[in-house]
Amino acid sequence: MAKFLLFWLAALVAGTALGLGSAWVAVSQLSLGGRVTVGGWSTNLNTGAAAADPYTRAAVARDGLLALARSETIYFNRDADDGGALLDAKCTYRLAGADLPARWWSITLYDETQFLARNADGAHSLDATRMVRDGGRYMVTIGPERGDAVNWLSTRNAGPFSLTLRLYNPDPALRADPRRLPPLTVEKIACAEGA
Amino acid sequence: MAGLMRFLLGVLVIGALVHGAAVIAAPYGLMRVAMQRASSDGAAVNRFVFGGPVTPESRAIVRPSPDLLYASCVYDLTEGPLRIRVAPWDDYVSLSLYAANTDNYFTANDRVAAGAPIEIALVARGQPAPQGAGKVVISPSVRGIALERRLAPTPERVALAQEARETSVCEPWP
């Protein structure tokens, strides 16, 4: 009897670990249920939608709870540079792009806990109203120091960070197919010693 | 050998059940936590809580935008319908509704409202629409969150937005 109980207890523990572990991997690591990546930026076509499958719903609840559905806002995220290396607060990057096809848009930097990095630089986000352009194009320095940059997102205390691009009331073409996002590159410029 | 096979099979079956249950339950769990936080542990239900500007200390809901000013109303329709009104704004403002499973089942913005307040009656499934209601929205769950987003990317705009939203209302239908 004791052996029987032990047998099923072991199966229960192992099965629970397997179930939770695989659920975590499926939701956080795998590209399940409508995820689309364009130029290093990822979005989920089913964010907020009632038709979302359980995996999408769980992934969005984890990474973007209370996000708006695609008809209102498209969210893109990225945690890697153009070379595929994870974004790191010890490095400096240059983001380059042009105006985006939406009523309003913003680019916001989040720390590894998915909140604004703990610093007082006041440079967590840049939006369409504040971005300084040159001939319709803009460049943003993403790094721990502003230097002589006209547009700056601070990585101070951000650790391994990520970027969120919000497009509010996207143009119909982009709404129909988020793969039409214009290029928005993130190039690594330099890293501090020991990075 | 048969014992080992039985063990592995048991692990797989239990694993699959736990996997499915965890994936389905996770959004409900995260939403419940969000509702707890947004209502100060249930103290503020069926009324707007007007959030201040988003700072590094704003850690209730993941990935908040510092360019938006948020107001949230954790709702419970057990006692009857709610009236929700979002005051007008000269830039982007929206009312969005979220069910207990995180679905964003309704959104209206200033363009739809064309300068007027966004005003709805929120009822639970099976509840009659209140008399005199204009736009009636049916919530798929009894509990959920209503969110107001007001675009205010600078301190000057934040001050104006805070003034503008004073007439936003989330309350039991009078």
Image (spheres, coloured by chain):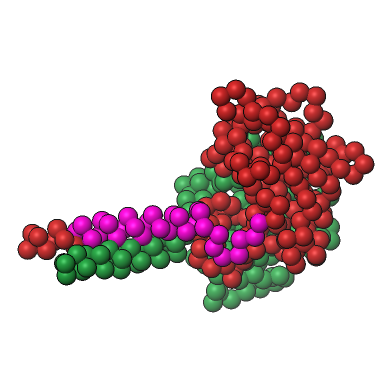
Chain colours: A red, B green
Please report the residue visible at 44 percent of the width from the left and 62 percent of the height from the top. Answer: B23
Please report the residue visible at 31 percent of the width from the left and 58 percent of the height from the top. Answer: A16
On whether residue A85 falls in the magenta region, the answer is no
Magenta stretch, main secondary structure, is helix
- Numbered circles on residues, count: 0
Residue A74 spot, x, y in % from top left: 70, 57
Residue B65 spot, x, y in % from top left: 67, 44
Residue B17 spot, x, y in % from top left: 35, 67
Is A50 or A63 nearer to us in this picture? Answer: A63
Please report the residue visible at 67 percent of the width from the left and 46 percent of the height from the top. Answer: A164
Is B8 or A178 nearer to us in this picture? Answer: B8
Residue stretch rendered in magenta on the structure: A9-37
Q: Residue furthest left?
A: A1
Please report the residue visible at 82 percent of the width from the left and 55 percent of the height from the top. Answer: A101
Q: Quadrant of the C terminus of chain A?
A: top right
Residue A44 spot, x, y in % from top left: 63, 60
Q: Quadrant of the N terminus of chain A?
A: bottom left
Is B157 or A39 nearer to us in this picture? Answer: A39
Q: Which image quadrant for residue A93? A: top right
Residue B6 is left or right of residue A95, and the answer is left
Q: Tell me if residue B75 can be seen.
A: no
Residue B52 is left or right of residue B35, and the answer is right
On whether residue A18 falls in the magenta region, the answer is yes
Q: Tell me if residue A187 can be seen.
A: yes
Is B26 or B113 nearer to us in this picture? Answer: B26
Q: Is residue A157 above or below residue A68?
A: above
Q: Which image quadrant for residue B46? A: bottom right
Q: Residue furthest right?
A: A135
Q: Is residue B75 above or below residue A110?
A: below
